[in-house]
Image (spheres, rainbow, N blue to C red):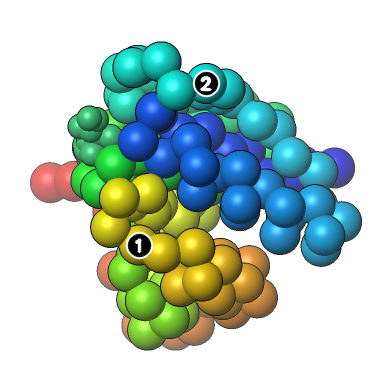
């Protein structure tokens, strides 16, 4: 069932962090759809952002996790898909807000900017925090329909 499946991907700048985050997902009993990259060879982050975005769009995963060097490029890539609300987070507060206010379905990290302890906390919060609904629903609805 796709809600329990988390798509995850990274470029070479996010590989180490991706592998750490996968351990948390596995410990929580979630299915992991790992879409690469798998080694330190230099790759292009858009390919990996698109891979996770497409997996969610196509119903192969319910949510996604992305890591690149800063988290910036890979979040921009994922957000090209109208179905995706990818949030680059840096701390517990931004992780919580990404769910409560933005109903983020992808969380993004910078492997060169965010340490593993903070990233693990953020991922737990992302998985556990419900969307706030109410006024935020109207705003989130507008995200998929730019003027
Ligand atoms: C790769 O060197 C780096 O540009 C990439 O990981 C990311 O930081 C892009 O936003």
x, y (%) of residue 119? 48, 65
x, y (%) of residue 78? 36, 36
The residue sitting at 61% across, 43% down in the picture is 19
Q: Is the CB of the residue bearing disc 1 within 8 angstroms of ligand 1?
A: no
Of all residues, the one furthest to the left in this rendering is 147
**The N terminus sits in image quarter:** top right
The residue sitting at 81% across, 43% down in the picture is 31
Of the two numbered discs 2 and 1 on the same chain, state the one appearing first in sequence: 2
Q: Does residue 13 sit above or below 84 in this rendering? A: above
Q: Does residue 37 sit above or below 118 in this rendering? A: above
Left/right placement of residue 10 relative to residue 13 reads: right
Task: Please tell me the numbered disc located at residue 81.
Answer: none
Say few, some or many: other residues with alpha carbon within 10 Å of mark 2 (under 14 / 14 to 19 / 20 or more): few
Left/right placement of residue 134 relative to residue 120 reads: left
Left/right placement of residue 123 relative to residue 139 reads: right
Q: Toward the viewer: 137 or 23?
A: 23
The residue sitting at 33% across, 17% down in the picture is 42
Q: Does residue 147 sit above or below 114 in this rendering? A: above
Task: Please tell me the numbered disc located at residue 39.
Answer: 2
Residue that carries the numbered disc 1 in the rendered image: 114
Q: Quadrant of residue 44?
A: top left
Q: Where ligand 1 lies, by image quadrant?
A: top left
x, y (%) of residue 35? 59, 25
The residue sitting at 12% across, 46% down in the picture is 147
Q: Quadrant of residue 104?
A: bottom left
Q: Is the CB of the residue bearing disc 2 within 8 angstroms of ligand 1?
A: no
x, y (%) of residue 97? 38, 79
| Residue 125 appearing in the image | yes
CA distance for labels 2 and 1? 20 Å
Say few, some or many: other residues with alpha carbon within 10 Å of mark 1 (under 14 / 14 to 19 / 20 or more): some
């Amino acid at each position: 069932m796709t809600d329990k499946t988390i798509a995850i991907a990274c470029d070479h700048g996010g590989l180490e962090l991706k592998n750490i985050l996968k351990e948390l997902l596995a410990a929580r009993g979630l299915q992991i759809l790992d879409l690469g990259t798998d080694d330190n060879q230099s790759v292009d982050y858009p390919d990996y952002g698109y891979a996770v975005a497409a997996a969610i769009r196509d119903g192969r995963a319910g949510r996604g996790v992305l890591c690149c060097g800063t988290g910036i490029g890979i979040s921009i890539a994922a957000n090209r898909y109208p179905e995706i609300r990818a949030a680059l987070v840096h701390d517990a507060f931004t992780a919580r807000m990404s769910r409560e206010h933005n109903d983020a379905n992808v969380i993004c990290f910078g492997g060169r900017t965010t340490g593993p302890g903070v990233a693990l906390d953020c991922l737990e919060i992302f998985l556990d925090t419900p969307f706030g609904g109410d006024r935020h629903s109207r705003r989130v609805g507008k995200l998929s329909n730019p003027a």
